[in-house]
Amino acid sequence: MNVLSVDTVSRWYGNVVAVNDVTMTIGPGITGLLGPNGAGKSTLISMLGGFLAPSAGTVTLDGVTVWKNPEIYRTIGLVPEREASYDFLTGWQFVLANAELHGLPDPGAAAKRALATVEMEFAQGRKVGEYSKGMRQRVKMASALVHDPAVLLLDEPFNGMDPRQRLHLMDLLRQMGAAGRTVLFSSHILEEVEQLAQQIEVMVAGRHAASGDFREIRRLMIDRPHQYVIRSSDDRALASALIADGSTAGVQLTDDVLSVEAVSFLRFTELLPRVARAAGIRLYEVSPTDESLESVFSYLVKS
């Protein structure tokens, strides 16, 4: 199954609450944990990986408690955001040591496969202390993959990577998700999550703010208007027809572009083609301008 469950979990440090009453389920495929810096993402991943005890609530993997359970590390691979490598070791020595700690039958072969997977064979003989930030990320990824885990937890994995490295890692994670592995990665970069994740969990100020596909999240927020740009054969007549209906809060026509603010998504999507057909108006373009993940995120943060 490889399902991680977070049940009413909180974590505090003295008077500081890092994670506040969070409940979520993370299953096979790619899940993006989105939120600004300080939202509680790293704390949550540390609890999912069994490195930090919840102050309240439970974290389980397939129904088994994660905290103080070393057996989970046969299933879980973790790439922390902080530097977790030894600068005096070569990349090969670092990954090999992790293979040996897992008690793999052929640690050398496992280390070789893991380094090849992240395209780090060319630098495996160099000391980790000489690596760039992106190379460090890749060798940490190799160490997390060395025992072929079914669950992968990645905390800001794309930090410091150049565009080519980023694309390669995205392709690698897509392959893992398609193979049925459970992959959770955190990011504060909206584009990364939008391009990669099938499921999105949004953290804001330690709380679980939203869950699902980002477009579904946006459409659930019925108390907020939806912005559209429309081009048609008669924008002025269309604007007059739309402004008379209660599903629109604002209609503006400037430079041959019709901008509409819809307060009821479902009603507006039914209204627009009906009004256009009745008036004999051809619709050339209907484009949402606020359905990017960035827009959803900014709304959630302001809520």
Image (tube, rainbow, N blue to C red):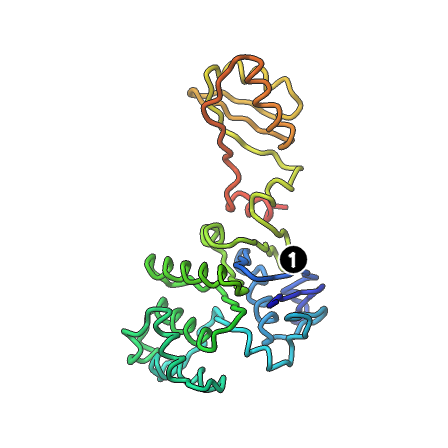
Looking at the image, residue 281 lies above or below residue 134? above
Q: Quadrant of the N terminus?
A: bottom right
Left or right side of 112 for 283:
right
Name the side, left or right, on which 135 lies relative to 44.
left
Q: Quadrant of residue 13?
A: bottom right
Percent x, y of residue 226: 58, 34
Q: Which of 90 and 298 is in front in this view?
A: 90
Q: Residue at x 49, y 28 (%)?
A: 286
Q: Is residue 277 above or below residue 105?
A: above
Residue shown at 65%/20% (left/top)? Answer: 245
Residue drawn at x 46%, y 21% is 254
Residue 267 relative to residue 214: left or right: right
Q: How many marks?
A: 1
User: Image point 54% across, 69% down: which residue?
Assistant: 151
Q: What residue type is labelled 1?
A: Arg
Mark 1 crowdedness (10 Å alpha carbons): few <14, some 14-19, many ≥20: many
Identify which residue, 241 or 171, lies in the foreground: 171
Q: Looking at the image, is 3 positioned above or below residue 264?
A: below
Report whether 103 appears left or right of 122. Answer: right
**Residue identified by numbered label 1:** 207
Q: Which of 90 and 254 is in front in this view?
A: 90
Q: Where is residue 88 in the image (x, y as percent from the top left)?
A: 35, 84
Q: For numbered disc 1, what is the local secondary structure?
A: strand
Q: Position of residue 185 (x, y in %)?
A: 51, 62
> Residue 182: x, y in percent?
55, 64
